[in-house]
Amino acid sequence: MAGRTGRARRPNGVGKDTKPATVRLSSRSWQIAEDAAEALGVTRDAYLDRLLAEERQRLDENGRPMWWTDPAPRDQEVLPLTQSA
């Protein structure tokens, strides 16, 4: 787009231990990440990388985000179904 400033790229050597990732986000979440990255003048990937690094500080003793209130599948009790009715 004309008149739009470019986003700052990471300097050489920064992020060299990164891994490519494919994620599926809702359109709204994608747009939030795009808007935040544009406002900061960084790439969407750089924004999401920093966001997740910040989130690491808000994990409980089990490594779960404190804001996650839905039950986790691993917490579901497994019933012993060794006999059929």
Image (cartoon, rainbow, N blue to C red):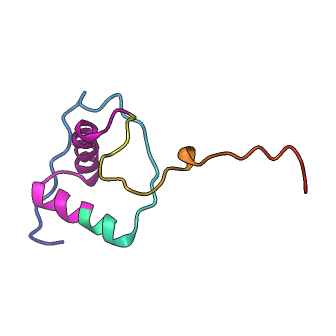
In the current view of this chain or complex, which residue is farthest to the front? 85
**Quadrant location of the N terminus in the rendered image:** bottom left
Q: Look at the magenta stretch and give its main secondary structure.
A: helix
In the picture shown, does residue 71 fall above or below 46? below
**Residue 54 magenta-drawn?**
yes
Residue 79 sits inside the magenta stretch: no
Q: Horizontal and vertical percent for residue 48? A: 28, 49
Horizontally, residue 78 falls left or right of residue 72, namely right
Q: Residue at x 89, y 47 (%)?
A: 83
Residue 18: image location, x then y, percent: 36, 34
Q: Look at 19% across and 44% down and name the residue there.
A: 9
The part of the chain drawn in magenta is: 33-61
Q: Nearer the viewer, residue 78 or 68?
A: 78
- Residue at point 24% right, 47% down? 51
For the image, the number of numbered tags is 0
Residue at x-position 19% and y-position 57%: 37
* 58 left or right of 39 in image: right
**For residue 54, above or below residue 4:** above
Looking at the figure, which quarter contains the C terminus? Answer: bottom right
Relative depth, front residue between 51 and 69: 69
Of residues 5 and 29, the one drawn nearer to the viewer in this rendering: 29
